[in-house]
Image (tube, rainbow, N blue to C red):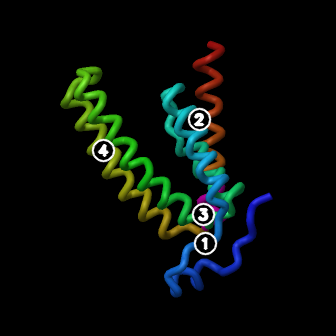
């Protein structure tokens, strides 16, 4: 099961420590999610965040924030690669990138105002919607 948190969120935040997690599992999950995302073209966020929360026991807000950082670097690298290979048109790609960055700021504000329980509920809905969309794309 998930490793239990030894300190409440406020305590590790005040002391500057990080929540305990299993680095071996974190590495395996990163490789699997990154590989699956690269093969399928699906963003790994809908897999990585639930795994960080429920398998590694990372607090919800840290999992979401960490994922934003991970996706920022992954998205930048993907954009550079696609633009460099002339696989996407420049201006639409820049518009989408700018929109995503703006939406991330809005998401941050929502994250700050909602409880972790509500955030997990929203995450569940997004994961379910993504799963339905993938099934529709595969079978229809």
Does label 3 or label 1 sit earlier along the sequence?
1
For the stretch drawn in magenta, the main secondary structure is: helix
Does label 2 or label 3 sit earlier along the sequence?
3
Q: Which of marks 1 and 2 is in front?
A: 1
Q: How crowded is mark 3: few (under 14 residues within 10 Å), some or many (20 or more)?
A: many
Judging by the rendered image, the residue that carries numbered circle 3 is 60
Q: Quadrant of residue 84?
A: top left
Tags 2 and 3 touching, CB below 8 Å = no
Tags 3 and 4 touching, CB below 8 Å = no
Residue at the image point whose x is 61% and y is 36% from the top? 129
Residue 122 shows in the view:
no
Does label 3 or label 4 sit earlier along the sequence?
3
Q: Which of marks 2 and 3 is in front?
A: 3
Quadrant containing the N terminus is bottom right
The span shown in magenta is 116-121
In-image side of 126 versus 93 (left or right) = right
Please tell me whether residue 90 is drawn above or below residue 140 in the rendered image: below
Q: Does the stretch in magenta take in 119?
A: yes
Residue at the image point whose x is 60% and y is 63% from the top? 60
Q: Which of marks 1 and 4 is in front?
A: 1
Q: Residues within 10 Å of mark 4 (few under 14, many from 20)?
A: few
Judging by the rendered image, the residue that carries numbered circle 2 is 130
Q: Position of residue 12 (x, y in %)?
A: 57, 81
Judging by the rendered image, the residue that carries numbered circle 1 is 19
C-alpha gap between disc 3 and disc 1: 11 Å
Judging by the rendered image, the residue that carries numbered circle 4 is 99
Does label 1 or label 2 sit earlier along the sequence?
1
Q: How crowded is mark 1: few (under 14 residues within 10 Å), some or many (20 or more)?
A: some
Residue 131 shows in the view:
yes
Please tell me whether residue 115 is drawn above or below residue 51 in the rendered image: below
Q: What element carries label 3?
A: helix
C-alpha gap between disc 1 and disc 2: 29 Å
């Amino acid at each position: 099961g998930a490793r239990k948190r030894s300190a409440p969120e406020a305590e590790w935040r005040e002391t500057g420590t990080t929540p305990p997690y299993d680095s071996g599992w974190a590495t395996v999950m990163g490789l699997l999610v990154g590989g699956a995302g690269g093969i399928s073209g699906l963003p790994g966020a809908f897999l990585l965040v639930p795994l960080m929360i429920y398998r590694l026991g990372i607090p919800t807000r840290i999992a979401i924030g960490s994922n934003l950082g991970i996706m920022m670097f992954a998205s930048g690298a993907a954009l550079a690669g696609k633009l460099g290979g002339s696989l996407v048109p420049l201006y639409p790609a820049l518009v989408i990138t700018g929109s995503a960055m703006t939406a991330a700021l809005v998401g941050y504000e929502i994250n700050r105002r909602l409880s972790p329980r509500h955030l997990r509920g929203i995450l569940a809905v997004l994961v379910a919607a993504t799963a339905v969309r993938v099934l529709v794309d595969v079978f229809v």
